Image (cartoon, grey):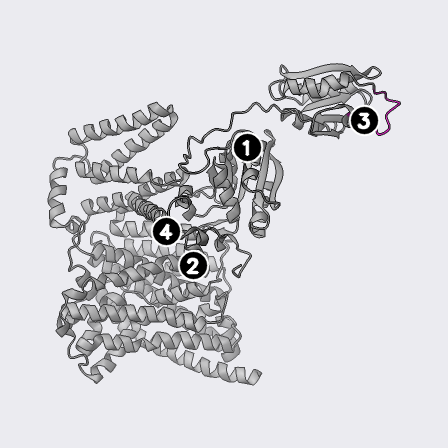
Amino acid sequence: MKKYRNEITRFQYMYIVQGSMIGVGILSLSSTVCKTAQQSGWISVLLSGIYPIYVVISSCLIYKNMDYLNFNKLNQKIYGKVISYVLSFAFILYFLSFSAFVISGFTNVLTFSTTKFLPYYIILFITSFITYLSINYGLTYIGRVSEIIFPLTILLLLIPLYFVNRGDITNLLPLISSFDGILKAMPDTLFSYSGVEICFLIIPFLSKKDKAIKYGILGSLITIVLYTLTILLIINYCGWKLTSKLQYPFLYLVAGAEIPVLSNFEPIFIFFWGNKIFHTISVGGFGCSYLLSELFNISYNKCSIILTVLIFFASLFLIPEYNRSQIVNTVLPYMIIFIFSWSLLTLIISYIKRGASK
Amino acid sequence: MADMLSTNISENFNIISSNIPSNFNFIKREIYIGENILCYILYISGLSDKNDIQETIIKPLLSSTISASDSFEGISQDLIKKYIYCPEVEATTSIKKICTEILSGKSIILIDGHIYAIICNTVSSKYRQIQESTTEKSIQGSKESFVENIDVNISLLQRKIKSSEFRMERFTIGEKTNTEIVLTYVNNIIDPKVLENIRTKIINISTPAILSLGFLEQYFDDNQYNIFPMSKVTEKPDKAAFDLLEGKAAIFISESPSALIVPATFIEFFQGFEDYSDKTVIASFSRILRFIAIITIIILEPIYLILLYYNPELFPYGLTTVIISSRQNIPLPPLLEILAMDLAVEILREGGIRLPNPIGTTLAIVGGIVIGDSATKAGLVSYATLFIVAITVISTFIIPNYQMALTIRFLRFPLLILGQLFGFFGLLIGLYLIIIILVKLENCGISYFAPLSPVRFTDMYDVIIRAPLKKVLVQPRSLRPSKKTKK
């Protein structure tokens, strides 16, 4: 049986939190928010950043209250055996769908941009296989990969910064279109922040658990800044009307500049972003495999294989992009509501139980 | 084979000679000492120093007046203490030990009627003189390099590290070769877990033969199909001393003019020893240049291939015209064109290594020019491709470590194939796979990709840049897995 390790450092935790949210959302988010919030879409994205911060804080507090029991034991202690099984199963479904959404979204983008010549099922198959290789040795190695991949986030941020002087500041004015629009656009942005829920599983694996909140918030802030700045620069460059009509405004942006040797930033962006995507899928995949392994008492490696197969087949139903968007828009709000309710309730009960034990 | 000597000298000799593989250079010298006590002096001609035997053993023994009845502690002890001049002497009854020591060049004195034999260190010291290394040139540092004598090598290292914490451990490995192995380290610097790991690996080696450090090196790699070097081989005592002071161990084997440094991490293969003698800014510039070279070797050819084959629209307008004009009438597809040139270069390189130095260099230069020129003139390869391959090949020479240079060179082939099959997606998965492989590798309890992963910020002063020496010359935290807190 393969050895696997789950212990991570605080920095690895921060990078995992940061990387777990960078998915397909970065490409299409601006289009979604501009439809409702117009030129103030970036404000919606910034305000929605409260969600990942809430998740990292609540997860830390829950585990602190429950003496860092693992996810299953924590649920069993709070909700009893039967409900804890149901909850674990719900989380498995969440992480499975999350990984499938990201993998299929990634495939859709690739077949739309630099790899038009490849059939989608080959991209899906290879990406699923890469996911297996990333997760089969446990969280420790996902954490290590996240440390290597993290600098790419900075490079991802540098690409839109190239367009700072090329846009028109009037595209962003007036800063606030309407308060209503800004608030209405906020739920749409939540999908871009989903993935951060991995905090609910990995905190017990931290080698040093103090300051976990600080590192979690730092990881979330990096992604919030990246998203906000990206949306701001896209609106600045394209204007909200064009942005709202494009499928992937970020790709449009990066394809808009000629640089030496390459005609535009698109392949460079796909390269940086692709690495982040592999990491995001790995994080979701780990969540699912870990819970499967705990719930059914199967070896972690076998669960990784099962998960890889499940992700592959689930993703087949999410091609092409309109299929995926439809399913994401239908399913994801319920999932977010479920996770939010669970975390809030668990936080309250864990706090009461902590008080009781004292 | 009997384990212990008997009192019958002829019987003892017969058993010993039956276990010595050679017979024509296995010498038996019979002498009578004191009151007609028969002695045999056994040694292997060529391995032992005859002058030494004559001066320190035969002469004093022949002039001895010892008698069996006079002996208080036994004849062997009397001979050792009163007559034999040889500085390293011991008595033994073990036939196995006698056979091993004869084969390593020592002389044995068998005494009739006595169960003890005397082992005298008369190993011939006729070895190659300490010379300048031909493979690791030093501009500012010491010119001396290791030789084929293990004792000389250890003394060279001891001269650099004059510390009471310098330790040596001796092992014998190889059922057929009985190769002597010496593990050296600095006791209060090396991490105990790392040391135990190294020791266990040496003890667990089960092999008929260890003939070079390369053999030993492979036993330090848990995964036999791993392509990344897990230990460094150096001929330079100053380099070995530097590594020992960082918390690593140096392993020597008999008859090998190099030291094996374990454990090694990925990053240090790109750090030249000369970096520490250069000014900070200059050394950092060289380092950055090396990392650019690595990226060039790995991705330049695959990117060129992908752009030609799948995404020509990504060439800017000015470059498109240049590429198109250079590729007109080229019959080979881009992959074959690149592979053909790469293979030609690899063959020339291999040929250059096997040939004597001046001829090898000439072959590489002339071969490179002739093949490149003829391939482009024949219309088989475009000038653009030749330029890309040439840049890649030149970049490989900048990697300071030969083993790592080979690995990095090899990596571009799978990436080329992935690029050909899947375009940019192939390159992406290839590079991600390399990262996965690197982060999963562990070496004697240390992460191979340290200090980049797990990140050790205190060790970052000596990765891509080389910070001022006072920040660099501290033991890396990555090499101290059992210590959680900073010293």
Answer yes or no: are tags 1 and 4 on the same subunit.
Answer: yes
Chain letter for mark 3, please: B
Kind of residue at badge 4: Ile
Q: Which residue is mark 3?
A: B78
Earlier residue among tags 1 and 2: 1
Q: Position of residue A135 (x, y in %)?
A: 42, 58
The one nearer the camera, B50 or B353, is B50
Q: Residues within 10 Å of mark 4 (few under 14, many from 20)?
A: some
Q: Position of residue B188 (x, y in %)?
A: 59, 50
Earlier residue among tags 2 and 3: 3
- The Cα–Cα distance between marks 1 and 3, rounded to whole angstroms, is 38 Å
- The Cα–Cα distance between marks 4 and 2, rounded to whole angstroms, is 12 Å
Which residue is at 42% across, 56% downward?
A: B453
- The Cα–Cα distance between marks 2 and 3, rounded to whole angstroms, is 63 Å
- Check disc 4 and report its element: helix, strand or loop: loop
Q: Which residue is mark 2?
A: B457
> Magenta span covers which residues?
B66-79
Earlier residue among tags 1 and 3: 3
The one nearer the camera, A282 or B315, is B315
Kind of residue at badge 1: Ile
Which residue is at 55% across, 85% downward?
A: A356
Nearer to us: label 1 or label 2: 2
- Check disc 2 and report its element: helix, strand or loop: helix
- The Cα–Cα distance between marks 1 and 4, rounded to whole angstroms, is 36 Å
Q: Which residue is mark 1?
A: B210
Q: Which residue is mark 4?
A: B464
Indicate whether B98 appears above or below A208.
above
Earlier residue among tags 1 and 4: 1
- The tag on residue B145 is none
Chain letter for mark 1, please: B
Q: Is residue B21 left or right of residue A336?
A: right
Q: Is residue A260 left or right of residue B182?
A: left
